[in-house]
Image: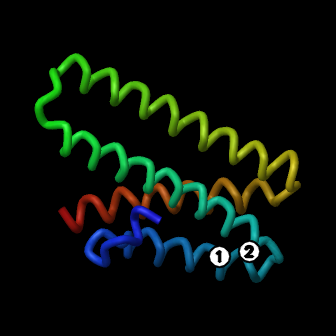
Amino acid sequence: MLILANYKTLPKVQLTIMLASIAYFSTIDAGVSALYGGVISLINTALITRHTNKQKKDATISAQIALWMMVISVIMRMAIVVGLTLTGYFVLELNADALIIGLVLGLIGFLLDKALYR
C-alpha cells in the first residue's frame, strides 16, 4: 500500500485512533463496522498521498492542469468513499453508527497526522 511504503509516512495518529475506535466498538459487537470505516479512511489517505506525490513529480505542469487534476482527485475520492460506505451499510449490513464514527475518526486522525508530522 502506498502509505505503508515508507515508515515516515505511516499515519501514526490515524492508526492509533482507528484501533481505539475498533476496541471501543468491539465491546458492543460492532468492531468489524468500525474497522470497515477505518479502512475507508485509509483508502482515502492512500489516494491523497498518491495524488500529492503525482503533483510533486509533475512540477512543470500549468496551474490550470494542476487545478483540474485536483478537482478530478476530489471527485474520485468522494465517489469511492460514498460508494464504500453505502456498500458497507446496505450490502454488508454493518452497524451504521460504528461505520460512520470509524470513518470520521480515521479522517480526523489523518488531519492530525498532517498537522503534527509536516
Disc number for residue 88: none
Q: From the viewer's perspective, is 112 left or right of 100?
A: left
* Visual colour scheme: rainbow
Compared to residue 6, the image places residue 87 above or below, namely above
Residue placed at 74% from the left, 65% from the top?
33
Vertical placement of residue 64 versus 53, above or below: above
Nearest the viewer among 5 and 27 is 5
Q: Which residue is at 19% across, 44% downward?
A: 57
Q: Are marks 2 and 1 in contact (CB under 8 Å)?
A: yes
The residue at the point 51 percent across, 39 percent down is 77
Residue position marked by numbered label 1 in the rendering: 22
30 relative to 118 in the view: left or right: right
Residue that carries the numbered disc 2 in the rendered image:
31
Question: Is 94 displayed left or right of 52 in the figure?
Answer: right
In terms of secondary structure, where does tag 1 sit? helix
Q: Position of residue 46 (x, y in %)?
A: 44, 56
Q: Quadrant of the C terminus?
A: bottom left
Q: CA distance from mark 2 to mark 1?
A: 5 Å
Along the viewing direction, whichever of 5 and 98 lies nearer the viewer: 5
* Total labels drawn: 2
Q: Quadrant of residue 103?
A: bottom right
Residue at 11% x, 31% y: name it.
60
Q: Residue furthest top?
A: 64
